[in-house]
Image: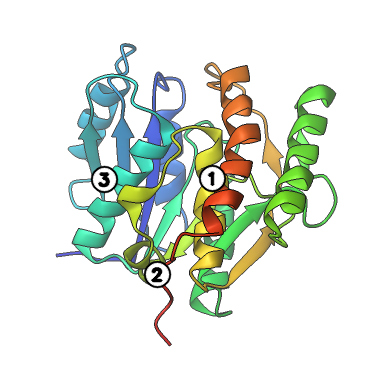
Amino acid sequence: MKRTDSLVIIPTYNEKENIEQIIRAVFHQEKSFDILVIDDGSPDGTAQIVNQLQKEFRTQLFLVKREGKLGLGTAYITGFKWAINKRYDYIFEMDADFSHDPTDLIHLYKACHDDGADVAIGSRYVSGVNVVNWPMGRVLMSYFASKYVRLVTGLSIHDTTAGFKCYKREVLETIELDKIQFKGYAFQIEMKFTAYKCGFTLKEVPVIFVNRKLGTSKMSSNIFGEAAFGVFQLKMRSWWYKYPQKKS
């Protein structure tokens, strides 16, 4: 039987240095969260570490193993469908590398559970620039990418590329998940834009983003390229696509 209303989805690829610590940190929070790890065939043994931890956290920790590196977006879509099937009320996106602070999970939860948001976004830019240990070039690229997305899409969100989020289940049930187009960096933009077009309320929650200390970043120039061109595709598609709407 499910003991909590909240599921944290953590996609992984070669995160053996971080995965046990992040799992324990999430389970250490005052509020109870379940965790679903979506592992894309990590050759470093990430999934095997999760398998071992499942013996300790039998009713809280779950694992989906996929063959090969299939992309961040498809990992989350897999997790969303799993969460909907299990009837979790609040579904979180979170990185494995501690760039997202587990203590902020409760703030995202409260934004949805108490404050009426449908999607809560852990925002690096809603109260200035709250990024630690990133090279200045990457900070500027990320900051101005969000500005660019706001300009093209009309979203009022300051951190349009953020990947630390909480969704109410209704959002994910309403969005046509199989029609989400992007797999990389643009996936985060597309999900926010689609939720907005479906009539849901998005709320930014200030967080401090800390660059990973262990493991290797999965960012690449191809990811940014997808985002740059993908934003225009999203905007043009919105002129004719009929978005399903939030139930009143």
Residue 223 visible somewhere in the drawing = yes
Q: Nearer the viewer, mark 1 or mark 3?
A: 1
Q: Is residue 196 left or right of residue 149?
A: left
Query: What amino acid does circle 2 point to?
Result: Pro
For image coordinates 38% across by 46% down, the residue present is 9
Horizontal and vertical percent for residue 19?
40, 30
Query: Which label belongs to residue 61?
Result: 3
- Mark 2 vs 1, N-terminal side: 1
What whole-number distance in Å separates the C-alpha atoms at marks 2 and 3? 32 Å
Query: Would residue 195 be found to the left or right of residue 77 on screen?
Result: right
Quarter of the view holding residue 24 = top left
Up/down of 218 relative to 62, above or below = above
Residue at the outermost left position = 1
Q: Residue at x 20, y 61 (%)?
A: 86
Say which element carries label 1: helix
Residue depicted at 77% across the width and 51% down the height: 151
